[in-house]
Image: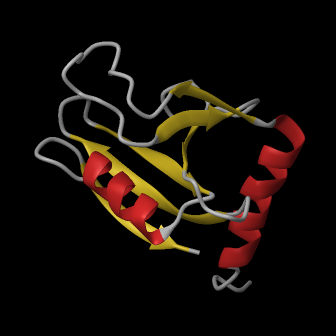
């Protein structure tokens, strides 16, 4: 078995997006529901019909790129909740990726970028 089949991983995520769609429940410029001082710098939501470790849909950052394609994922660690999550980078430009990395790699959360 080959462990170099990264494209299969991203293609599967894209199939889920095509089949189920996405929901943006935290639009760019809106505040976090529990932390009103935290303003989302980019659209943030989830892939419909999926489930992540916390029981909600797989998280997704939607950028303003030209192609509707997944460009990578950010794996995060949250020391407060003591959990990890995956954030799918969909339709993101290089600037969108930098913005998402700043959002998920800050004084609390720690994130690592895995490019497609």
Query: What is the number of callouts on the image?
Result: 0
In this orientation, which residue lies closer to the viewer: 3 or 11? 11
Q: Position of residue 32 (x, y in %)?
A: 33, 21
Q: Position of residue 72 (x, y in %)?
A: 55, 66
Q: Quadrant of residue 91?
A: bottom right
Q: Position of residue 68 (x, y in %)?
A: 73, 58
The residue at 48%/28% (across/down) is 54
The residue at 73%/31% (across/down) is 48
Q: Position of residue 60 (x, y in %)?
A: 56, 43
Indicate left or right for 16 with 101 as reference. right
Residue 101 seen by the camera: yes
Return the residue found at the far right: 19
Q: Is residue 109 above or below residue 100?
A: above
Indicate left or right for 54 with 48 as reference. left
* Colour mapping: secondary structure
The residue at 24%/16% (across/down) is 36
Question: Which quadrant: the C terminus?
Answer: bottom right
Q: Is residue 62 above or below residue 99?
A: above
The residue at 72%/76% (across/down) is 7
Indicate left or right for 3 with 107 as reference. right
Indicate left or right for 15 with 52 as reference. right
Residue 52 seen by the camera: no
Question: Which quadrant: the N terminus?
Answer: bottom right
């Amino acid at each position: 078995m080959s462990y170099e089949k990264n494209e299969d991983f991203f293609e599967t995520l894209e199939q889920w997006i095509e089949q189920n769609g996405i929901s943006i429940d935290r639009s760019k410029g809106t505040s976090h529901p529990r932390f009103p001082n935290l303003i989302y710098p980019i659209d943030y939501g989830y892939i419909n019909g999926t489930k992540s470790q916390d029981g909600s849909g797989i998280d997704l950052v939607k950028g303003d790129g030209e192609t509707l394609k997944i460009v990578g994922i950010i794996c995060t660690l949250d020391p407060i909740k003591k959990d990890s999550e995956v954030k799918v980078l969909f339709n993101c430009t290089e600037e969108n990726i930098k913005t998402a990395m700043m959002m998920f790699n800050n004084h609390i959360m720690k994130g690592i970028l895995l490019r497609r």
